[in-house]
Image (cartoon, coloured by chain):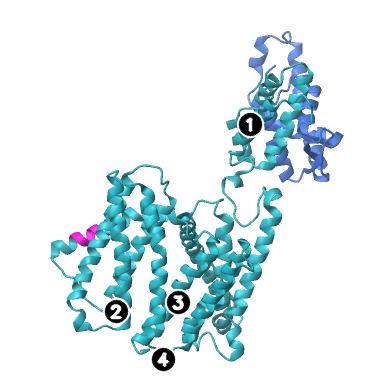
Amino acid sequence: MKPDHSADLEAQIAEWRSFLLRRRAIHSVDVAELEDHLREQIDVLAEAGLDPDEAFLVAVKRMGALDALSAEFAREHSERLWKQLVAAGADATEDGPGARKEGFVAVALAVLAALLIKLPSLFGLDFMSDGAFYARNLSFFVLPVLTGYFAWKRGMLGSTALRWLGVAFVGAAVFANVYPFEPGGSTEALTALHLPIALWVAVIGAAYVGGRWRESAGRMDFIRFSGELFIYYVLIALGGGVLMVFSALIFQAIGVDIEPLFESWVLPCGAAGAVIIASWLVEAKKSVIENMAPVLTRLFTPLFAIMLLAFLGTMLWTGAGINIEREVLIAFDLLLVLVLALVLYTISARDPQSGPGAFDVVQVVLIASALAADAVALQAIGARISEFGFTPNRVAALGMNLILLVNLAWSAVLYVRFLGARSTFSAIERWQTGYVPVYALWAALVVIAFPPLFGFA
Amino acid sequence: MEINKDLVAASSTPIVLAILAEGDSYGYAILQRVRELSGGDLEWTDGMLYPVLHRLSRLGLVESRWEVAESGRRRKYYRITPDGRAHLGEQQRQWQAVDATLRGIWHTLADVPPIGRPALSATIPQGV
């Protein structure tokens, strides 16, 4: 390094470097190579008698126009325009060892989860024939491993917080297994459905955010993570399905039936391991690749808004009432969950600083039409609830419906205030993130209180 | 003298490979050598050399390694591979064939009108 390099020159070089780094086709190793070139050029020019400033300008000029250079790099490295995920990539020099270690830990934990899910077969419980046991306990084979992964990642190993999460798992396992459920009863099915929700939000959420559970931003990160994980998991499941179909086909060609092996090993182990792998992938790529959930919400929010408006319009036009059948409440619950997901993932990707736009109006239309449709359904059900009777399923569905209704209704109010410039967008964000624990509490209530309330039916 | 862009692009591979065949080198030194050899006629935009080097590296004609130079900076050195030498030999034969053809035609033309007149460039066939 030459002593006559002024701090000024260093600042100029740093600025030039950051300009280059912004180009996607030019990786940091290439920038290092170009910077070496630039510095040598500057040294030579300075020796020839130029000021550092002049030498810098000439050297940069000789390097060529940034756009042309970037285009040339892009032509040679066209793969760089597609952000690559699994391979650590050309920037491996910087985060290589850490990323590799994390990948190793993730794969090891995925294998652990896959083995854990087969543990009960040592005690004669089979994935296919003991469905009820597995349905109630599915969370306990996968979620503790995932909690361990995040505890390791966030440096929480051995902390008091982690011990409390362990206590939560033990408590949940007790509630899932000590109640004398009637075989095939509704309360058992409700437990199987609600236990993962409660554990996901409360335990995985706490492990994911580390110490930031009380912060709105931390919870929003967890919401983003959950959405991306879901998309990744679906993609992995699709890939797994293709793999299984092809294996079955080619093994059939040689007269071997591998379906039993699939049902008792590949499917459960794959499904368990994929949760860990998908979580690792989401974590590894979150800052590298555009998040998918907000893209999908952007696409589907207007479409669902149109669908709901058409539904309401048709109902008014034909005067048809909602046909109250057993599953109608669940259908409307799912509708509200879907609308909530659309709202949540739009919020998660929105810049809270920017003002109201056309898309926010679409959001309000979507929420309002969903609420209207749900109100019609609730009114129809309310009129005949005494006739139907309070079964556990119906109470659970009704409770969930009301919780979602409150969330969306207040979101609509906040949105309208925001559109009228009487409130900020972060108020909507805070409301959503603040509401998250309500789902965990309700799910826990269903798991803990419903079985005794309804006589384990 | 301004040399046609296509010609610069086409000649860059043999020139870079030939310079590396003289010995391992790095970007700035390669460019210096190009200037030296061409007497300053061949002016490459500095940055453009690197995509060329990366392409040769991808094709396995050169290999690279990072070293700490005497200036204390990390510097990427390139070395020609056996494949690169084979490719260079092939390129050399091709360019010599082109060169021989051109020399032949320059020679015939030189017999008729005086050399270096603007009229000459008009008689050069397209696509050379």
Distance (Cα) linking label 4 and label 1: 70 Å
Element at badge 2? helix
1 or 2: mark nearer the eye: 2
Is tag 1's residue or tag 2's residue first in the polypeptide sequence? 1
Residue A120 position in % (x across, y down): 58, 86
Amino acid carrying mark 2 in the image: Arg
Instruction: Assign a secondary structure to mark 1.
Output: helix
- Please indicate whether residue A446 sits to the left or right of residue A12 in the image: left
Q: Residue A264 in the image: x percent, y percent? A: 56, 83
Above or below, comparing residue A77 to residue B44 in the picture:
below
Image quadrant in which the C terminus of chain A is located: bottom left
Q: Chain of mark 4?
A: A
> To which residue does mark 1 refer?
A16
| First in residue order: circle 4 vs circle 3 | 4
Q: Could you tell me what secondary structure mostly forms the magenta stretch?
A: helix
Question: Mark 3 and mark 4 in contact (Cβ < 8 Å)?
Answer: no
Which residue has dot 4 on it?
Answer: A183
**Other residues around mark 2 within 10 Å, as few (<14) / some (14–19) / many (≥20):** some
Task: Say if labels 4 and 2 share a chain.
Answer: yes
Of residues A320 and B120, the one nearer the viewer is: A320
Bounds of the magenta span?
A308-313
Q: Chain of mark 3?
A: A
Badge 3: residue crowd in 10 Å (few <14, some 14–19, many ≥20):
many
Q: Are marks 1 and 2 in contact (CB under 8 Å)?
A: no
